[in-house]
Amino acid sequence: MATQKKEKQALKFLDPAKVLQEIGLEEGMQVADFGAGSGYFAFQASEMIGKNGNLYAMDVQKAVIDHLNKEIKHQGLTNFKTVWTDLEMVGHNPIPAGNIDLVLIVNMLFQSTKHNKILQEVCRELKPGGRLAVIDWKREAAPFGPPPDDRVDLEKFKEIAYTLGLNKIKEFAAGPYHFGIVFRK
């Protein structure tokens, strides 16, 4: 539970509605939230895409999925689905290839060294012209969050993305401690 407390503290510096608007989330979209965690961004995205969209919250932690399922039921959401999966294993999750308009990755990449595998899975799931939006910790000291050396090296990450055919369309400050970057397939 200490991890959830730290996540909530860090996320209070991110405004999901503002960030999702910045990346161009629209009603009716098919959205996958990779490493959804507590659902801080997923629940806001679910509201913004409306009943004609679908939100797939994906996480490797079964307890996280169970928590999200309880909240989905409590809120009576019909456009919000959970997927228990390992996003570092390409083709491991049940989402059909080429089905997603937007993949969100928020505060997840610093927890993995397998960015190439994760991006391969992003590319598998995205429709042609689909977008990837990454929000993660800036690689600098902050009063909380992961150590700077554990944070994403954005230049190396971009190189992997470019190699896989993703094109950067936007970079922005997602918050005082976070960067935002959007790619198109």
Image (cartoon, rainbow, N blue to C red):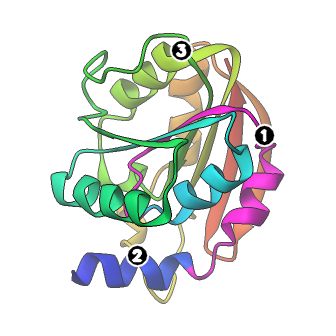
- Residue 87 belongs to the span the image colors magenta: no
Relative height, residue 8 to residue 138 (above, below): below
Q: Residue at x 28, y 64 (%)?
A: 67
> Of the numbered discs in the image, which one, if any, rests on residue 27?
1
**In the displayed structure image, the side of residue 70 where residue 32 appears, left or right:** right
Element type at marker 2? helix
How far is the residue under mark 2 from the one under mark 1?
Answer: 27 Å
Q: Secondary structure at mark 1?
A: loop
Q: Residue at x 38, y 30 (%)?
A: 118
Compute the Cα span from label 3 to label 1: 28 Å
Q: Over which residues does the magenta segment extend?
A: 12-38
Check disc 2 and give the amino acid type.
Glu
Residue 7: x %, y % from top left: 40, 75
**Label 2 or label 1, whichever comes before in sequence order:** 2
Return the x and y of residue 56 as percentages of the image width and height: 46, 38
Query: Mark 3: which secondary structure?
Result: loop
Q: Which is in the foreground here, disc 3 or disc 1?
A: 1
Please provide percent x and percent y for residue 141. Answer: 50, 79
User: Which of the 4 quarters of the picture holds residue 18?
Assistant: bottom right
